[in-house]
């Protein structure tokens, strides 16, 4: 498969997984509430969130390995897998050395459990034990990601999620209590690790090291000098993502959190789709850096950037059209934060997606130190702006704070470096966005007019309004999909679909 085929396959499976998880989650949450009770389920959600902090003890090795794998494959196009095995062996050795640190961290997490945690203690111990034992085995998935086996990983994500969900539901019905949700998590982790090992042994046997190489102090320092910057960036991201809710709850009271999060629900769910583009493209960009010219890398980076913003703009216009009606029907009028809040959420989302498209390329070019420092600075500015904004303007100040952080820190600090690495000026990078920006602004104006003038409320009205805006967006954006660097990837896919459709019509006698 070509790089573009692997990217498209991985993106398609990732998108399907998100839709499936969202649809089933709408039914699964009431099911768990009904059988476990709000208190027990809430307690589990609190303690399971602690795993995010335990994951920081990885020190960025698992996040760095896909890029290093792609680097190794790109540097050795004749025999990529033996070179990958050398890199994989070093990372695996480092992960094994980290196991005592992870075990210690898991023990310390027990001290952070709430006082009323007797029911959750043993299920949580089961989760922690699995995390520690299978900690090095997570690298199997990271290597497959670097090898761009994205179709398999997408299928595995679906199967693993389904296995975990079925396990949890079955044990809940058997009155297993919180052991049910713990067992579902364990089933997903074990299945994923063993399936990735099987895939490596059958499809990429040469990528598995025959024996673990000796990792010198200099080798450890080399890995950590790069991976620790990723960890620092993850810390900044972890602190930044939940800060708005914490500050609103502190300054305005817990009851003010609910309308804020309900208004942002559609934005937070649908914003994952553009991020899938970047996650699927990252290994290919890293490999290109080692094997292609700067002109080729610039073309691919431009195509990824345009596709990301194409999807992000569609989310902007679609959510702007239906968000008010969706929230009103979902949780009621009192939980809708207003049109201004929706606009701020959507603006922040688009800016963040553009920034992430820049950051993904910079990470593939080896600038993890710059990205980490930028993330920490952005997080600090956002935190200060949010505290002041909530104090002065409530929800509006909280939604405005991320925009301030992006515009004053992330974009200025990283855009100039991105332009330099791709052989362009900052103006050339921004000018490349103008055709998309003008078209998106036109559709957004129509969406705003529908929201303010027609105020669709019922399901039929919301569906018709969303379809109208979607069709208008596709019609205006169609030239951007089929022209330029993105068009070189889209046109062959569309022609292949047309050929398959014509063939199917012929076999059915409809042609």
Image (spheres, grey):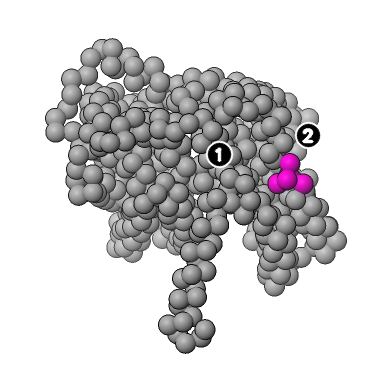
In the displayed structure, does residue 482 sit left or right of residue 157?
right
Instruction: Please state which of residues 2 and 139 is positioned toward the viewer in this rendering.
Output: 2
Image quadrant in which you'd find residue 246: top right
Rounded to the nearest angstrom, the CA distance separating label 1 from label 2 is 43 Å
Q: Which mark is residue 117?
A: none
Residue 435 colored magenta? Answer: yes
> Can residue 345 be seen by looking at this rendering?
no
Residue that label 2 marks: 393
Main secondary structure along the magenta-highlighted residues: helix
Instruction: Please state which of residues 26 and 510 is positioned toward the viewer in this rendering.
Output: 510
Question: What span is colored magenta in the figure?
Answer: 434-438
Instruction: Please state which of residues 474 and 255 is positioned toward the viewer in this rendering.
Output: 474
Estimate the x, y position of residue 272 in percent, counting from the top left.
54, 47
In the displayed structure, does residue 25 sit left or right of residue 99?
right
In the displayed structure, does residue 505 sit left or right of residue 457?
left
Estimate the x, y position of residue 447 in percent, counting from the top left.
77, 57
At 29% across and 17% down in the image, what residue appears? 220
**Furthest-left residue in view?**
211
At 29% across and 48% down in the image, what residue appears? 192
**Furthest-bottom residue in view?**
509
Estimate the x, y position of residue 136 in percent, counting from the top left.
26, 34
**Furthest-top residue in view?**
218
Estimate the x, y position of residue 31 in percent, counting from the top left.
45, 62
Q: Which mark is residue 299?
A: 1
Depicted 453 relative to depicted 388: above or below:
below
Of badges 1 and 2, nearer the viewer stands 1
Image quadrant in which you'd find residue 453: bottom right
Depicted 380 relative to depicted 304: above or below:
above
Q: Earlier in the sequence, mark 1 or mark 2?
A: 1
At 43% across and 40% down in the image, what residue appears? 284
> Can residue 13 be seen by looking at this rendering?
yes
**Furthest-right residue in view?**
453
């Amino acid at each position: 498969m070509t790089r573009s085929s692997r990217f498209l396959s991985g993106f398609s499976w990732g998108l399907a997984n998100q839709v499936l998880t969202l649809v089933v989650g709408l039914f699964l949450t009431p099911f768990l509430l009904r059988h476990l009770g709000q208190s027990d389920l809430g307690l589990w959600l609190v303690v399971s969130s602690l795993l995010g902090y335990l994951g920081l003890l990885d020190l960025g090795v698992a996040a760095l390995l896909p890029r290093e794998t792609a680097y190794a494959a790109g540097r050795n196009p004749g025999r990529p897998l033996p070179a990958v095995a050398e890199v994989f062996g070093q990372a695996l050795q480092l992960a094994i050395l980290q196991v005592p640190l992870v075990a210690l961290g898991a023990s310390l997490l027990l001290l952070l459990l709430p006082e009323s945690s007797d029911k959750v203690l043993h299920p949580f111990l089961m989760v922690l034990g699995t995390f520690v034992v299978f900690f090095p085995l997570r690298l199997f998935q990271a290597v497959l990601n670097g090898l761009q086996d994205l179709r398999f990983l997408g299928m595995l994500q679906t199967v693993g999620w389904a296995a975990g969900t079925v396990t949890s539901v079955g044990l809940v019905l058997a009155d297993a209590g919180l052991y049910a949700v713990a067992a579902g998590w364990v089933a997903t982790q074990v299945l994923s690790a063993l399936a990735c090992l099987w895939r490596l042994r059958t499809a990429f046997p040469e990528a598995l090291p025959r024996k673990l190489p000796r990792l010198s102090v200099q080798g450890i320092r080399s890995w950590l000098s790069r991976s620790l910057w990723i960890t620092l960036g993850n810390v900044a991201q972890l602190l930044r993502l939940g800060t708005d809710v914490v500050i609103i709850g502190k300054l305005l009271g817990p009851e003010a959190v609910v309308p804020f999060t309900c208004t942002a629900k559609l934005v937070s769910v649908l914003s994952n789709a553009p991020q899938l583009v970047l996650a699927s493209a990252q290994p290919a960009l890293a490999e290109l850096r080692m094997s292609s010219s700067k002109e080729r890398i610039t073309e691919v980076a431009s195509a990824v950037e345009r596709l990301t913003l194409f999807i992000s703009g569609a989310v902007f216009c679609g959510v702007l059209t239906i968000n008010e009606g969706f929230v009103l029907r979902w949780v009621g009028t009192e939980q809708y934060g207003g049109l201004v809040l929706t606009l701020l959420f959507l603006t922040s989302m688009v800016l963040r997606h553009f920034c992430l498209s820049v950051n993904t390329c910079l990470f593939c070019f080896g600038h993890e130190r710059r990205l980490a420092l930028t993330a920490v600075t952005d997080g600090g500015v956002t935190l200060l702006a949010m505290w002041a904004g909530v104090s002065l303007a409530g929800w509006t100040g909280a939604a405005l704070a991320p925009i301030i952080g992006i515009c004053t820190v992330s974009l200025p600090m990283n855009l100039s470096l991105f332009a330099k690495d791709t052989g362009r000026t900052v103006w050339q990078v921004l000018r490349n966005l103008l055709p998309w920006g003008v078209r998106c602004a036109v559709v957004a104006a129509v969406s705003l007019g529908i929201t303010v003038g027609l105020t669709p409320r019922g399901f039929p009205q919301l569906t018709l309004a969303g379809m109208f805006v979607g069709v208008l967006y596709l019609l205006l954006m169609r030239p951007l999909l089929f022209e330029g660097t993105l068009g070189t990837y889209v046109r062959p896919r569309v022609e292949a679909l047309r050929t398959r459709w014509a063939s199917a019509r012929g076999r059915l006698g409809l042609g």
